[in-house]
Amino acid sequence: MNNPFVMLGDGFAHVLQGGAIFHAFWAVLIGIVIGALPGLTATMGVALLTTLTFTMGPQVAMLVLVCVYVGAIYGGSRSAILLNIPGTPASAASTLDGFPLARKGMAGRAMGISTLGSWLGTLFGTLILAMFAPSFGEFALEFGSYEMFWVALFGIVIAGSLSGGDALKGYIAGFLGLLVATVGQETNHAYPRFAFGNADLAGGLGLLPVLVGVFGVAEVLNSMRGPAVKAVSSKIDSVIPRVRDVAQYWRTIFRSGALGTFIGAMPGLGEDIAAWTSYAAAKRASAEREQFGKGSVEGLMAAETGESACVPGAIIPVLTLAVPGSAPAAVLMAAMMIHGLNPGPMLAITAPEFIYQIVAMLVIADMVKLVYGLVLVKPLLWVLLIPRSRLMPVVFVLCTVGAFAITSRLFDIWVMLGAGLVGFILRELRFPMAPLVLGIVLGDLLDKNLLRGLVLSGGDVSPFFTRPISAGLCALTVLAALWAVPGFMDRVTGLFRRRQPV
Amino acid sequence: MSGAPETAESPFSGDRAPLPPRVDLYTAAVLLAFGLAVISLAWSMPTFVEQSHTGLTAPGIVPGFHGLVITFLAVLLALRAVRRGALQPSATQGRALAPGDARQLGTAAFLGVLYAGFLIGTLPFWMAAALFVFAFTAAFEWDAGPEGRVRRLIEAAVLGIGTGIAVTLVFERIFLVRLP
């Protein structure tokens, strides 16, 4: 009875029960507003909204969070086009061509392209998720403790290598995250690590308070610096996307969709990398590459399709391996755990229908996003004009509510404050945040699987290197680390170049 | 990104203007001390050999591993900073924060800690939130000049009370979430 089409139909029927559409509409709207406001990121949006979903059923909660995620990644392009400031880091590549288009008086057209690109991107990524996640989930059942240890380590290393400018600092951030996750009682002997006799610390540092701190509090502090941003172009031409743009750039759309989904599926590489990679690939392949950076429709389309295709891509490893593909997906995964949905390899056995329900949620979110993309133009301009001195304190209040709500401990608010201040300082010292978050989320997975692996092998570390999948993952991890060594890639490419006949 | 406008953001959010190597050296020193402290704490954790017979479930193994890696990476960071000239006298040039930024950040951080650390739990939540939002908005809009200041202060008060009441109602009544 595991017909994928039947299961997909069931998924839609299940998700659309009750007032799902109503939830989808408000959640996507909140997502778009959060994404559009500079200083509020998709990760922060999903983390804050997780609080609101505590009393909802798991299905509705997931629908709300998926909608916020999809909406926020899209919303970031609005401020990128109109203000030349990416609303979320994911939209940074969209500023390159979006803002020049707006300056030419084509802000509406740019928003239309962004809507179209983003819509197609998420749809493409969702299709890939629906096609590959179930079979990859079954393959992931082969993964034992040894393999899962490497998956977690690979996530940290690749996130460190590629998600920030400085790989070394990326690794350090990743391992700091892993270390944060070890605080509190461990599973084997209930020994409170790093608790120093404090009962609150023995309970561990909550995932949500730490994430709200790192992405909420630190972001509030960060956005209060520097001069305030002003000036929004208020004359908007038609935002209706043109069919000609799709017909003309279908290759770019497919390429960016595939790249975005693939990068999303790599642990730890988020929407920003997806957008930049898609943009760079489009530029390389384009016949009109001199237009890139000066208001190229193709460039904006590539960036938007790439970043939005990354969203379903980033959910693939969440569902199949319990390893998040991006920072917002990490929070989404935490929310799944809070709601008792255990993502990971066992999902293919215990609840295969959940994968199709997520597909249905993504499609619904994408459709609602399209509707807003076409009608929600002027109101978003007003939102962008809210001064930060009025917006940020309200966001901070929401952060404290979010940190407190899950366990009702005042200690969690202190954790949020501490994580926020440390996160801010680390950011100032140019440590990337994606590996840190990934470390915090993957810490438990790595901890359990390393110890379980050691116990199973009686202390012998060789299975970590000799089992076929383990060896493959180990090689990938080493390669990901070497990638970041200065000069390594040049030497490897030099090696191949020398072998070519002259 | 040769054709990119100068105002465009960098490809990577964490990749702004590079810091002076001296700052990296100090960071490496702090991380080194931190890593060594973690190793020593992990080493002193009980091993539970009697319960597990192997000692392979010792709670210190995983944090010890992380501590070792952080220590190793801190040494690498220090060596890199030295190679980039951290020990040369000119290495301290350049600063991380603009002077105005430091004041703004300090104000935001102070108000945040005051609110989240002390007001919450002491006052009813709606009142703490209202006071915080008012103080924050008023502090950051004070510099806009005396003209219209009274109006701005009244708006800040309305925003504060509105936030306090709205957040309490929405979270406690509609979404049934417990508030501090």
Image (tube, coloured by chain):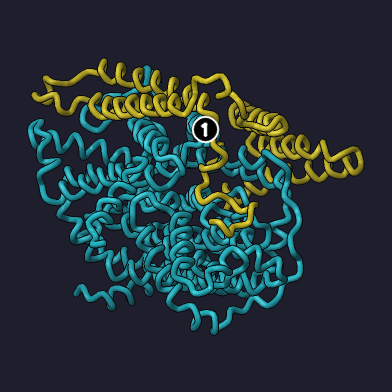
Spot occupied by residue A206 in the image (x, y as percentages of width and height)? 42, 36
Spot occupied by residue B153 in the image (x, y as percentages of width and height)? 83, 40
Is B138 drawn above or below residue A63 in the view shown? above
Label 1, secondary structure: give it.
loop
Q: In the drawing, does residue B72 fall left or right of residue A237? A: left
Q: Residue at x 52, y 59 (%)?
A: A73
Quarter of the image where the N terminus of chain A is located? bottom left
Q: Extreme right residue here?
A: B147
Q: In the drawing, does residue A455 fall left or right of residue A430? A: left
Q: Looking at this view, is B100 or A393 the one in front?
A: B100
Q: Which residue is drawn at 54% across and 63% down?
A: A74
Q: In the drawing, does residue B152 fall left or right of residue A356? A: right
Q: Looking at this view, is B102 or A104 the one in front?
A: A104
* Residue B32 visible to an observer of this rendering: yes
Spot occupied by residue A347 in the image (x, y as percentages of width and height)? 25, 58
Q: In the drawing, does residue A197 fall left or right of residue B45? A: right
Q: Quadrant of residue A227?
A: top right
Q: Which residue is drawn at 33% across and 54% down?
A: A266
Give the color of chain A as drawn: cyan
Q: Extreme front residue here?
A: A502
> Dot 1 surroundings within 10 Å: few (below 14), some, or many (20 or more)?
some
Q: Which amino acid does label 1 sit on?
A: Leu
Residue with the mark numbered 1: A429
Quarter of the image where the C terminus of chain A is located? bottom left
Is B41 drawn above or below residue A313 in the view shown? above
Q: Looking at this view, is A238 or B122 the one in front?
A: A238
Spot occupied by residue A15 in the image (x, y as percentages of width and height)? 40, 69
| Chain of the residue under label 1 | A
Q: Which residue is drawn at 10% across and 30% down?
A: A459
Q: How many labels does the image show?
A: 1
Give the color of chain B as drawn: yellow
